[in-house]
Image (cartoon, grey):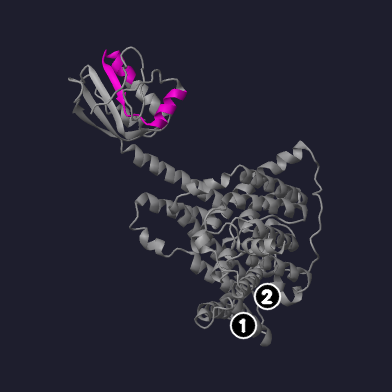
Protein backbone atom coordinates (compact mmCIF):
# COMPACT_ATOMS: atom_id res chain seq x y z
CA UNK A 1 0.00 0.00 0.00
CA UNK A 2 2.82 2.40 0.89
CA UNK A 3 4.57 1.65 -2.40
CA UNK A 4 1.33 2.26 -4.27
CA UNK A 5 0.76 5.69 -2.76
CA UNK A 6 4.43 6.61 -3.01
CA UNK A 7 4.21 6.09 -6.77
CA UNK A 8 0.64 7.25 -7.41
CA UNK A 9 0.40 10.37 -5.25
CA UNK A 10 3.29 12.28 -6.86
CA UNK A 11 1.97 11.46 -10.35
CA UNK A 12 -1.52 12.63 -9.32
CA UNK A 13 -0.28 15.91 -7.84
CA UNK A 14 1.86 16.58 -10.90
CA UNK A 15 -1.01 15.76 -13.24
CA UNK A 16 -1.51 12.63 -15.29
CA UNK A 17 -2.15 14.57 -18.51
CA UNK A 18 1.36 15.97 -18.71
CA UNK A 19 3.56 15.31 -21.69
CA UNK A 20 6.30 13.01 -20.41
CA UNK A 21 9.17 15.32 -21.34
CA UNK A 22 7.43 18.33 -19.76
CA UNK A 23 6.65 16.69 -16.41
CA UNK A 24 8.41 18.62 -13.60
CA UNK A 25 10.12 16.89 -10.71
CA UNK A 26 7.94 16.90 -7.60
CA UNK A 27 10.69 18.03 -5.22
CA UNK A 28 10.56 20.32 -2.17
CA UNK A 29 11.49 23.36 -4.29
CA UNK A 30 8.69 22.73 -6.82
CA UNK A 31 6.21 22.13 -4.02
CA UNK A 32 7.14 25.41 -2.34
CA UNK A 33 6.87 27.26 -5.66
CA UNK A 34 3.42 25.79 -6.26
CA UNK A 35 2.23 26.70 -2.77
CA UNK A 36 3.46 30.28 -3.07
CA UNK A 37 2.01 30.52 -6.57
CA UNK A 38 -1.32 29.27 -5.19
CA UNK A 39 -1.19 31.97 -2.50
CA UNK A 40 -0.62 34.63 -5.15
CA UNK A 41 -3.49 33.35 -7.27
CA UNK A 42 -5.84 33.21 -4.29
CA UNK A 43 -5.27 36.90 -3.60
CA UNK A 44 -6.06 37.74 -7.21
CA UNK A 45 -9.21 35.58 -7.10
CA UNK A 46 -10.86 37.56 -4.30
CA UNK A 47 -11.69 40.87 -6.05
CA UNK A 48 -12.59 39.05 -9.28
CA UNK A 49 -15.07 36.73 -7.52
CA UNK A 50 -16.65 39.63 -5.62
CA UNK A 51 -16.89 41.83 -8.72
CA UNK A 52 -18.43 39.08 -10.86
CA UNK A 53 -20.94 38.33 -8.11
CA UNK A 54 -22.03 41.98 -8.28
CA UNK A 55 -22.30 41.72 -12.08
CA UNK A 56 -24.49 38.62 -11.78
CA UNK A 57 -26.67 40.30 -9.16
CA UNK A 58 -25.90 37.92 -6.26
CA UNK A 59 -24.19 38.21 -2.89
CA UNK A 60 -20.34 38.34 -2.83
CA UNK A 61 -20.15 35.02 -0.94
CA UNK A 62 -21.94 33.34 -3.88
CA UNK A 63 -19.00 34.32 -6.08
CA UNK A 64 -16.41 33.35 -3.47
CA UNK A 65 -18.01 29.94 -2.90
CA UNK A 66 -18.02 29.33 -6.66
CA UNK A 67 -14.35 30.30 -6.90
CA UNK A 68 -13.48 27.86 -4.09
CA UNK A 69 -15.60 24.88 -5.20
CA UNK A 70 -15.00 25.15 -8.95
CA UNK A 71 -11.33 25.92 -8.34
CA UNK A 72 -10.58 22.94 -6.10
CA UNK A 73 -12.52 20.35 -8.11
CA UNK A 74 -10.97 21.34 -11.43
CA UNK A 75 -7.54 21.50 -9.78
CA UNK A 76 -7.94 17.91 -8.57
CA UNK A 77 -9.44 16.25 -11.66
CA UNK A 78 -9.01 18.82 -14.46
CA UNK A 79 -7.37 18.13 -17.76
CA UNK A 80 -4.50 20.57 -17.36
CA UNK A 81 -2.46 21.04 -14.15
CA UNK A 82 -1.64 24.72 -13.80
CA UNK A 83 -5.05 25.98 -14.92
CA UNK A 84 -7.13 28.02 -12.49
CA UNK A 85 -10.92 28.05 -12.58
CA UNK A 86 -13.52 30.11 -10.75
CA UNK A 87 -16.32 32.62 -11.21
CA UNK A 88 -15.86 34.55 -14.45
CA UNK A 89 -17.26 37.67 -16.05
CA UNK A 90 -18.15 35.87 -19.29
CA UNK A 91 -20.68 33.76 -17.37
CA UNK A 92 -21.81 36.55 -15.02
CA UNK A 93 -23.10 38.76 -17.83
CA UNK A 94 -25.39 35.92 -18.98
CA UNK A 95 -26.61 35.18 -15.45
CA UNK A 96 -27.72 38.68 -14.53
CA UNK A 97 -31.00 38.65 -16.48
CA UNK A 98 -31.98 35.27 -15.00
CA UNK A 99 -31.26 36.46 -11.46
CA UNK A 100 -33.09 39.75 -12.01
CA UNK A 101 -36.25 38.08 -13.27
CA UNK A 102 -36.36 34.81 -11.29
CA UNK A 103 -33.92 35.12 -8.37
CA UNK A 104 -30.76 33.32 -7.23
CA UNK A 105 -32.44 29.93 -6.61
CA UNK A 106 -33.12 29.63 -10.32
CA UNK A 107 -29.48 30.48 -10.92
CA UNK A 108 -28.33 27.58 -8.73
CA UNK A 109 -30.63 25.20 -10.61
CA UNK A 110 -29.30 26.54 -13.91
CA UNK A 111 -25.70 26.00 -12.80
CA UNK A 112 -26.50 22.36 -11.98
CA UNK A 113 -28.04 21.82 -15.44
CA UNK A 114 -25.09 23.64 -16.98
CA UNK A 115 -22.77 21.17 -15.26
CA UNK A 116 -24.79 18.24 -16.61
CA UNK A 117 -24.42 19.58 -20.16
CA UNK A 118 -20.66 19.85 -19.62
CA UNK A 119 -20.53 16.30 -18.25
CA UNK A 120 -22.36 15.11 -21.37
CA UNK A 121 -19.80 16.87 -23.55
CA UNK A 122 -17.02 15.11 -21.64
CA UNK A 123 -18.64 11.67 -21.87
CA UNK A 124 -19.17 12.12 -25.62
CA UNK A 125 -15.57 13.37 -25.90
CA UNK A 126 -16.61 16.57 -27.64
CA UNK A 127 -13.61 18.32 -26.14
CA UNK A 128 -11.51 17.03 -29.03
CA UNK A 129 -13.30 19.44 -31.37
CA UNK A 130 -11.26 22.24 -29.83
CA UNK A 131 -8.56 21.08 -32.25
CA UNK A 132 -10.65 22.49 -35.09
CA UNK A 133 -10.19 26.04 -33.85
CA UNK A 134 -7.61 27.66 -36.18
CA UNK A 135 -4.58 29.54 -34.90
CA UNK A 136 -5.86 32.99 -36.03
CA UNK A 137 -8.95 32.40 -33.87
CA UNK A 138 -6.76 31.44 -30.91
CA UNK A 139 -4.69 34.58 -31.48
CA UNK A 140 -7.79 36.75 -31.58
CA UNK A 141 -9.10 35.05 -28.43
CA UNK A 142 -5.88 35.74 -26.52
CA UNK A 143 -5.68 39.36 -27.60
CA UNK A 144 -9.37 40.01 -27.02
CA UNK A 145 -9.32 38.47 -23.58
CA UNK A 146 -6.21 40.46 -22.65
CA UNK A 147 -8.07 43.65 -23.60
CA UNK A 148 -11.14 42.55 -21.64
CA UNK A 149 -9.00 41.88 -18.54
CA UNK A 150 -7.42 45.31 -18.91
CA UNK A 151 -10.75 47.09 -19.35
CA UNK A 152 -12.20 45.30 -16.33
CA UNK A 153 -9.47 46.86 -14.19
CA UNK A 154 -10.38 50.35 -15.39
CA UNK A 155 -13.66 49.99 -13.51
CA UNK A 156 -11.69 50.11 -10.26
CA UNK A 157 -10.94 53.77 -10.99
CA UNK A 158 -14.61 54.49 -10.36
CA UNK A 159 -16.23 54.78 -6.96
CA UNK A 160 -18.63 52.01 -8.01
CA UNK A 161 -15.60 49.75 -8.15
CA UNK A 162 -15.46 49.73 -4.37
CA UNK A 163 -18.97 49.64 -3.11
CA UNK A 164 -21.02 52.54 -4.46
CA UNK A 165 -24.21 52.04 -6.42
CA UNK A 166 -23.53 51.88 -10.22
CA UNK A 167 -25.82 54.89 -10.81
CA UNK A 168 -23.64 56.91 -8.45
CA UNK A 169 -20.35 55.97 -10.13
CA UNK A 170 -17.75 58.70 -10.39
CA UNK A 171 -14.16 58.68 -11.55
CA UNK A 172 -11.68 59.05 -8.72
CA UNK A 173 -9.51 62.14 -8.90
CA UNK A 174 -7.05 64.28 -7.01
CA UNK A 175 -4.77 62.77 -4.36
CA UNK A 176 -6.63 59.43 -4.41
CA UNK A 177 -5.98 59.06 -8.14
CA UNK A 178 -2.27 59.88 -7.76
CA UNK A 179 -1.86 57.41 -4.90
CA UNK A 180 -3.65 54.70 -6.85
CA UNK A 181 -1.58 55.23 -10.00
CA UNK A 182 1.63 55.31 -7.97
CA UNK A 183 0.83 52.06 -6.18
CA UNK A 184 -0.10 50.38 -9.48
CA UNK A 185 3.19 51.52 -11.03
CA UNK A 186 5.12 50.32 -7.97
CA UNK A 187 3.41 46.91 -8.14
CA UNK A 188 4.24 46.52 -11.84
CA UNK A 189 7.84 47.61 -11.26
CA UNK A 190 8.28 45.09 -8.44
CA UNK A 191 6.88 42.28 -10.60
CA UNK A 192 9.34 43.23 -13.32
CA UNK A 193 12.36 43.57 -11.00
CA UNK A 194 11.87 40.70 -8.53
CA UNK A 195 12.85 37.84 -10.91
CA UNK A 196 16.23 39.55 -11.39
CA UNK A 197 16.99 38.95 -7.71
CA UNK A 198 15.08 35.78 -6.80
CA UNK A 199 12.75 33.26 -8.37
CA UNK A 200 12.00 31.38 -5.17
CA UNK A 201 9.06 33.64 -4.28
CA UNK A 202 6.62 34.53 -7.11
CA UNK A 203 7.08 38.14 -8.18
CA UNK A 204 3.35 39.03 -7.91
CA UNK A 205 3.30 37.80 -4.30
CA UNK A 206 6.33 39.96 -3.45
CA UNK A 207 4.68 42.97 -5.08
CA UNK A 208 1.35 42.47 -3.28
CA UNK A 209 3.13 42.01 0.06
CA UNK A 210 5.39 45.07 -0.27
CA UNK A 211 2.62 47.38 -1.48
CA UNK A 212 0.22 46.15 1.22
CA UNK A 213 2.78 46.74 3.98
CA UNK A 214 3.50 50.20 2.55
CA UNK A 215 -0.19 51.15 2.52
CA UNK A 216 -0.87 49.75 5.99
CA UNK A 217 2.34 51.12 7.52
CA UNK A 218 1.90 54.66 6.21
CA UNK A 219 -1.90 54.50 6.51
CA UNK A 220 -2.38 55.56 2.89
CA UNK A 221 -6.05 56.16 2.23
CA UNK A 222 -6.76 54.10 -0.89
CA UNK A 223 -9.53 51.56 -1.66
CA UNK A 224 -8.94 48.09 -0.23
CA UNK A 225 -10.55 44.71 -0.79
CA UNK A 226 -12.72 45.23 2.26
CA UNK A 227 -14.33 48.21 0.52
CA UNK A 228 -15.78 45.86 -2.09
CA UNK A 229 -17.60 43.66 0.42
CA UNK A 230 -17.06 41.70 3.60
CA UNK A 231 -15.33 38.35 2.98
CA UNK A 232 -16.37 36.78 6.29
CA UNK A 233 -18.56 33.71 6.03
CA UNK A 234 -18.93 30.05 6.93
CA UNK A 235 -18.30 26.82 5.08
CA UNK A 236 -20.64 26.45 2.09
CA UNK A 237 -23.72 24.40 3.01
CA UNK A 238 -25.46 21.80 0.86
CA UNK A 239 -28.96 22.71 -0.26
CA UNK A 240 -31.27 21.76 -3.09
CA UNK A 241 -32.33 24.81 -5.14
CA UNK A 242 -35.81 25.91 -4.07
CA UNK A 243 -37.47 25.88 -7.48
CA UNK A 244 -40.59 24.03 -8.67
CA UNK A 245 -39.72 20.74 -10.34
CA UNK A 246 -41.87 21.39 -13.40
CA UNK A 247 -41.50 21.62 -17.15
CA UNK A 248 -42.05 25.35 -16.85
CA UNK A 249 -38.95 25.63 -14.67
CA UNK A 250 -36.98 23.54 -17.17
CA UNK A 251 -38.14 25.83 -20.00
CA UNK A 252 -36.80 28.81 -18.05
CA UNK A 253 -33.39 27.44 -17.10
CA UNK A 254 -32.67 25.27 -20.17
CA UNK A 255 -31.57 28.03 -22.59
CA UNK A 256 -29.47 29.76 -19.91
CA UNK A 257 -27.81 26.47 -18.95
CA UNK A 258 -27.01 25.64 -22.58
CA UNK A 259 -25.48 29.06 -23.27
CA UNK A 260 -23.49 29.01 -20.02
CA UNK A 261 -22.19 25.51 -20.76
CA UNK A 262 -21.10 26.53 -24.26
CA UNK A 263 -19.35 29.70 -23.03
CA UNK A 264 -17.76 27.89 -20.09
CA UNK A 265 -16.41 25.02 -22.18
CA UNK A 266 -15.12 27.22 -24.98
CA UNK A 267 -13.29 29.51 -22.55
CA UNK A 268 -11.97 26.55 -20.55
CA UNK A 269 -10.74 24.60 -23.57
CA UNK A 270 -9.11 27.63 -25.17
CA UNK A 271 -7.37 28.37 -21.86
CA UNK A 272 -6.34 24.71 -21.72
CA UNK A 273 -4.69 25.05 -25.12
CA UNK A 274 -3.00 28.31 -24.17
CA UNK A 275 -1.59 26.90 -20.92
CA UNK A 276 -0.57 23.76 -22.80
CA UNK A 277 1.44 25.79 -25.30
CA UNK A 278 3.25 27.58 -22.46
CA UNK A 279 4.02 24.42 -20.46
CA UNK A 280 4.39 21.87 -23.29
CA UNK A 281 1.39 19.77 -22.22
CA UNK A 282 -0.88 17.74 -24.47
CA UNK A 283 -4.40 16.29 -24.32
CA UNK A 284 -6.91 16.51 -21.52
CA UNK A 285 -9.75 18.30 -23.35
CA UNK A 286 -12.46 15.75 -22.59
CA UNK A 287 -11.18 15.34 -19.04
CA UNK A 288 -11.46 19.10 -18.59
CA UNK A 289 -15.10 18.95 -19.76
CA UNK A 290 -15.81 16.31 -17.12
CA UNK A 291 -14.04 18.34 -14.44
CA UNK A 292 -15.90 21.56 -15.31
CA UNK A 293 -19.20 19.68 -15.35
CA UNK A 294 -18.57 18.02 -11.99
CA UNK A 295 -17.49 21.34 -10.47
CA UNK A 296 -20.59 23.19 -11.63
CA UNK A 297 -23.01 20.47 -10.52
CA UNK A 298 -21.45 20.53 -7.06
CA UNK A 299 -21.29 24.33 -6.78
CA UNK A 300 -24.96 24.58 -7.76
CA UNK A 301 -25.86 22.43 -4.74
CA UNK A 302 -23.65 24.54 -2.44
CA UNK A 303 -24.93 27.99 -3.37
CA UNK A 304 -22.24 29.00 -5.88
CA UNK A 305 -22.70 30.89 -9.14
CA UNK A 306 -20.73 28.41 -11.23
CA UNK A 307 -17.61 29.11 -13.23
CA UNK A 308 -15.03 28.03 -15.75
CA UNK A 309 -11.31 28.45 -16.47
CA UNK A 310 -9.86 31.91 -15.82
CA UNK A 311 -7.17 32.97 -18.25
CA UNK A 312 -5.87 35.84 -16.10
CA UNK A 313 -5.37 33.79 -12.95
CA UNK A 314 -4.05 30.87 -15.01
CA UNK A 315 -1.41 33.16 -16.48
CA UNK A 316 -0.47 34.40 -12.99
CA UNK A 317 -0.06 30.81 -11.85
CA UNK A 318 1.98 29.63 -14.82
CA UNK A 319 4.25 32.68 -14.83
CA UNK A 320 4.74 32.36 -11.07
CA UNK A 321 6.06 28.84 -11.60
CA UNK A 322 2.93 26.82 -10.76
CA UNK A 323 3.13 23.57 -12.69
CA UNK A 324 1.29 20.89 -10.70
CA UNK A 325 -2.12 20.35 -9.15
CA UNK A 326 -0.75 21.58 -5.83
CA UNK A 327 -0.93 25.20 -7.03
CA UNK A 328 -4.62 25.09 -7.90
CA UNK A 329 -5.53 23.14 -4.77
CA UNK A 330 -3.67 25.51 -2.45
CA UNK A 331 -5.17 28.56 -4.19
CA UNK A 332 -8.67 27.25 -3.44
CA UNK A 333 -7.80 26.29 0.14
CA UNK A 334 -6.27 29.70 0.80
CA UNK A 335 -9.42 31.31 -0.59
CA UNK A 336 -11.57 29.24 1.78
CA UNK A 337 -9.32 30.19 4.70
CA UNK A 338 -9.87 33.87 3.92
CA UNK A 339 -13.63 33.33 4.14
CA UNK A 340 -13.44 31.33 7.37
CA UNK A 341 -10.52 32.82 9.33
CA UNK A 342 -8.58 35.66 7.68
CA UNK A 343 -11.16 37.97 6.16
CA UNK A 344 -10.12 41.01 8.21
CA UNK A 345 -6.48 40.59 7.17
CA UNK A 346 -7.15 40.06 3.45
CA UNK A 347 -9.58 42.98 3.40
CA UNK A 348 -6.62 45.30 4.13
CA UNK A 349 -4.89 44.52 0.79
CA UNK A 350 -5.08 47.59 -1.49
CA UNK A 351 -6.99 47.04 -4.71
CA UNK A 352 -4.27 48.99 -6.55
CA UNK A 353 -1.80 46.14 -5.91
CA UNK A 354 -4.14 43.62 -7.54
CA UNK A 355 -4.80 45.99 -10.45
CA UNK A 356 -1.04 46.19 -11.01
CA UNK A 357 -0.80 42.39 -11.05
CA UNK A 358 -3.61 42.13 -13.60
CA UNK A 359 -2.06 44.83 -15.79
CA UNK A 360 1.13 42.77 -15.91
CA UNK A 361 -0.99 39.78 -16.87
CA UNK A 362 -2.45 41.83 -19.72
CA UNK A 363 1.02 42.80 -20.93
CA UNK A 364 2.20 39.21 -20.76
CA UNK A 365 -0.94 37.72 -22.33
CA UNK A 366 -1.39 40.00 -25.33
CA UNK A 367 0.45 38.64 -28.36
CA UNK A 368 2.34 41.80 -29.27
CA UNK A 369 4.14 40.15 -32.17
CA UNK A 370 0.73 39.58 -33.80
CA UNK A 371 0.55 43.30 -34.59
CA UNK A 372 3.65 43.01 -36.75
CA UNK A 373 2.66 39.69 -38.32
CA UNK A 374 -0.76 41.04 -39.35
CA UNK A 375 1.00 42.67 -42.30
CA UNK A 376 2.78 39.44 -43.30
CA UNK A 377 0.11 36.75 -43.00
CA UNK A 378 -2.71 36.30 -45.56
CA UNK A 379 -5.31 39.04 -45.40
CA UNK A 380 -8.04 36.54 -44.60
CA UNK A 381 -6.17 35.35 -41.50
CA UNK A 382 -5.49 38.92 -40.42
CA UNK A 383 -9.19 39.71 -40.79
CA UNK A 384 -10.07 36.69 -38.63
CA UNK A 385 -7.65 37.81 -35.89
CA UNK A 386 -9.03 41.35 -35.85
CA UNK A 387 -12.67 40.20 -35.99
CA UNK A 388 -12.32 37.66 -33.15
CA UNK A 389 -10.47 40.21 -31.03
CA UNK A 390 -13.14 42.86 -31.59
CA UNK A 391 -16.11 40.55 -30.96
CA UNK A 392 -14.47 39.18 -27.79
CA UNK A 393 -14.21 42.72 -26.46
CA UNK A 394 -17.58 44.02 -27.64
CA UNK A 395 -19.78 40.90 -27.32
CA UNK A 396 -18.50 37.69 -25.72
CA UNK A 397 -16.02 34.89 -26.22
CA UNK A 398 -18.43 32.21 -27.46
CA UNK A 399 -19.80 34.35 -30.29
CA UNK A 400 -16.28 35.48 -31.22
CA UNK A 401 -14.98 31.91 -31.50
CA UNK A 402 -17.99 30.70 -33.50
CA UNK A 403 -17.69 33.64 -35.92
CA UNK A 404 -13.93 33.08 -36.23
CA UNK A 405 -14.30 29.37 -36.97
CA UNK A 406 -17.01 30.03 -39.57
CA UNK A 407 -14.87 32.71 -41.24
CA UNK A 408 -11.84 30.40 -41.32
CA UNK A 409 -13.93 27.53 -42.70
CA UNK A 410 -15.35 29.72 -45.47
CA UNK A 411 -11.89 30.99 -46.38
CA UNK A 412 -10.55 27.43 -46.51
CA UNK A 413 -13.50 26.26 -48.60
CA UNK A 414 -13.02 29.15 -51.05
CA UNK A 415 -9.29 28.52 -51.38
CA UNK A 416 -9.83 24.80 -51.89
CA UNK A 417 -12.58 25.46 -54.40
CA UNK A 418 -10.34 27.65 -56.54
CA UNK A 419 -7.72 24.89 -56.81
CA UNK A 420 -9.88 22.55 -58.88
CA UNK A 421 -8.64 22.30 -62.47
CA UNK A 422 -8.04 19.75 -65.20
CA UNK A 423 -5.34 18.94 -67.75
CA UNK A 424 -6.41 17.48 -71.06
CA UNK A 425 -4.31 14.94 -72.92
CA UNK A 426 -4.84 12.12 -75.44
CA UNK A 427 -5.13 8.63 -73.94
CA UNK A 428 -2.07 6.44 -74.33
CA UNK A 429 -3.96 3.17 -73.96
CA UNK A 430 -7.20 3.90 -75.78
CA UNK A 431 -6.75 5.46 -79.18
CA UNK A 432 -8.99 8.44 -79.84
CA UNK A 433 -9.97 8.88 -76.18
CA UNK A 434 -9.47 12.16 -74.30
CA UNK A 435 -8.20 12.15 -70.68
CA UNK A 436 -9.18 14.80 -68.11
CA UNK A 437 -6.59 14.76 -65.28
CA UNK A 438 -8.42 16.37 -62.33
CA UNK A 439 -6.32 18.26 -59.79
CA UNK A 440 -7.60 19.55 -56.43
CA UNK A 441 -10.30 18.40 -53.99
CA UNK A 442 -13.80 17.85 -55.28
CA UNK A 443 -16.40 18.88 -52.68
CA UNK A 444 -19.42 21.15 -52.32
CA UNK A 445 -17.30 24.28 -52.80
CA UNK A 446 -15.58 23.12 -55.98
CA UNK A 447 -18.38 21.07 -57.58
CA UNK A 448 -19.59 24.04 -59.68
CA UNK A 449 -16.06 24.66 -60.94
CA UNK A 450 -15.69 20.96 -61.67
CA UNK A 451 -18.74 21.01 -63.94
CA UNK A 452 -17.29 23.94 -65.87
CA UNK A 453 -14.10 22.02 -66.72
CA UNK A 454 -15.78 19.84 -69.34
CA UNK A 455 -16.62 20.71 -72.95
CA UNK A 456 -19.07 17.90 -73.68
CA UNK A 457 -20.03 19.04 -77.16
CA UNK A 458 -16.42 19.36 -78.37
CA UNK A 459 -15.04 16.19 -76.77
CA UNK A 460 -14.56 12.88 -78.69
CA UNK A 461 -16.84 9.88 -78.21
CA UNK A 462 -14.58 8.35 -75.52
CA UNK A 463 -13.66 10.44 -72.43
CA UNK A 464 -11.66 9.37 -69.38
CA UNK A 465 -11.75 11.34 -66.10
CA UNK A 466 -8.66 10.58 -63.99
CA UNK A 467 -8.89 11.36 -60.24
CA UNK A 468 -5.33 10.32 -59.33
CA UNK A 469 -4.49 13.90 -58.24
CA UNK A 470 -7.88 14.65 -56.74
CA UNK A 471 -10.11 13.49 -53.91
CA UNK A 472 -13.85 13.10 -53.93
CA UNK A 473 -15.06 14.32 -50.53
CA UNK A 474 -18.84 14.51 -50.17
CA UNK A 475 -22.27 13.97 -51.70
CA UNK A 476 -22.08 17.22 -53.67
CA UNK A 477 -18.99 15.85 -55.41
CA UNK A 478 -20.75 12.57 -56.23
CA UNK A 479 -23.69 14.49 -57.64
CA UNK A 480 -21.34 16.58 -59.78
CA UNK A 481 -19.78 13.40 -61.18
CA UNK A 482 -23.21 11.98 -61.90
CA UNK A 483 -24.28 15.20 -63.62
CA UNK A 484 -21.26 15.13 -65.93
CA UNK A 485 -21.86 11.46 -66.66
CA UNK A 486 -25.46 12.26 -67.52
CA UNK A 487 -24.39 15.00 -69.96
CA UNK A 488 -22.00 12.66 -71.80
CA UNK A 489 -24.67 9.96 -71.83
CA UNK A 490 -27.18 12.41 -73.29
CA UNK A 491 -24.63 13.24 -76.01
CA UNK A 492 -24.18 9.49 -76.77
CA UNK A 493 -20.58 9.58 -75.57
CA UNK A 494 -18.76 6.99 -73.48
CA UNK A 495 -17.16 8.12 -70.17
CA UNK A 496 -14.84 6.32 -67.76
CA UNK A 497 -13.63 7.25 -64.26
CA UNK A 498 -10.23 6.23 -62.99
CA UNK A 499 -8.18 6.23 -59.79
CA UNK A 500 -10.94 6.91 -57.33
CA UNK A 501 -9.78 6.63 -53.72
CA UNK A 502 -10.97 4.17 -51.10
CA UNK A 503 -12.95 6.99 -49.47
CA UNK A 504 -14.78 7.68 -52.71
CA UNK A 505 -15.34 3.95 -53.17
CA UNK A 506 -17.15 3.87 -49.83
CA UNK A 507 -19.16 7.00 -50.67
CA UNK A 508 -20.25 5.57 -54.01
CA UNK A 509 -21.17 2.26 -52.42
CA UNK A 510 -23.17 4.00 -49.68
CA UNK A 511 -25.05 6.17 -52.16
CA UNK A 512 -25.88 3.26 -54.44
CA UNK A 513 -23.88 4.65 -57.36
CA UNK A 514 -21.20 1.96 -57.35
CA UNK A 515 -22.65 -0.82 -59.45
CA UNK A 516 -19.72 -3.03 -60.52
CA UNK A 517 -16.39 -3.94 -58.94
CA UNK A 518 -13.51 -4.76 -61.25
CA UNK A 519 -9.88 -5.78 -61.05
CA UNK A 520 -9.01 -3.47 -63.94
CA UNK A 521 -7.61 -0.99 -61.38
CA UNK A 522 -5.67 -3.23 -58.94
CA UNK A 523 -4.30 -0.34 -56.84
CA UNK A 524 -7.71 1.07 -56.00
CA UNK A 525 -10.05 -1.78 -57.01
CA UNK A 526 -12.62 0.79 -58.06
CA UNK A 527 -15.09 0.46 -60.88
CA UNK A 528 -18.49 2.03 -61.46
CA UNK A 529 -21.14 1.76 -64.14
CA UNK A 530 -23.46 4.74 -64.37
CA UNK A 531 -25.60 3.16 -67.07
CA UNK A 532 -25.38 1.99 -70.64
CA UNK A 533 -22.64 4.36 -71.74
CA UNK A 534 -20.62 4.57 -68.50
CA UNK A 535 -18.08 1.80 -68.65
CA UNK A 536 -15.66 -0.11 -66.44
CA UNK A 537 -12.55 1.83 -65.39
CA UNK A 538 -9.09 0.57 -65.89
CA UNK A 539 -5.57 1.98 -65.99
CA UNK A 540 -4.20 4.34 -68.59
CA UNK A 541 -0.49 3.75 -68.09
Q: Quadrant of residue 57?
A: bottom right
Q: Secondary structure at mark 2?
A: loop
Badge number at residue 210: 1
Residue 310 visible in the current orientation: yes
Residue at position x 78%, y 38% from top? Answer: 246
As for residue 509 lying within the magenta part, the answer is: yes
- In this orientation, which residue lies closer to the viewer: 88 or 69? 69
Badge number at residue 224: 2
Q: For mark 1, does the 10 Å Cα neighbourhood hold few (<14), some (14 to 19), or many (20 or more) residues?
A: some
Question: First in sequence: mark 2 or mark 1?
Answer: 1
- Please give the range of residues in magenta: 485-510
**The residue positioned farthest toward the bottom in the image shown:** 218
Residue at position x 57%, y 78% from top? Answer: 200
As for residue 163 lying within the magenta part, the answer is: no
Q: CA distance from mark 2 to mark 1?
A: 15 Å
- In this orientation, which residue lies closer to the viewer: 534 or 3? 3
Q: Is residue 472 above or below residue 146?
A: above
Percent x, y for residue 415? 35, 42
Amino acid sequence: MLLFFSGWLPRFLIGMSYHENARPNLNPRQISIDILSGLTVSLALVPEAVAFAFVAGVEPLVGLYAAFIVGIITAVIGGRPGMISGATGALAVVMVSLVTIHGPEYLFATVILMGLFELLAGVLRWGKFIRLIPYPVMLGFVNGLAIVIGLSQIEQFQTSGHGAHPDQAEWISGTLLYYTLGLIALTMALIWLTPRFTKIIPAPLVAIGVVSLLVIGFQIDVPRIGDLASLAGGFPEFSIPMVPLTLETLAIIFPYALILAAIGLIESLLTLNLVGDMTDQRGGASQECLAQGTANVVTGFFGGMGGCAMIGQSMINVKSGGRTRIAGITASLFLLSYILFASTLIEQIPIAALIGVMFMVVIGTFAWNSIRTLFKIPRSDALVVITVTAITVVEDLAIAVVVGVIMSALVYAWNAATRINAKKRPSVQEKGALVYEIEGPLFFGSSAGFRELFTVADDPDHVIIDFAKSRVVDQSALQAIEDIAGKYHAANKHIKLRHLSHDCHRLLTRSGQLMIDSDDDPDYMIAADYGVKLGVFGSDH
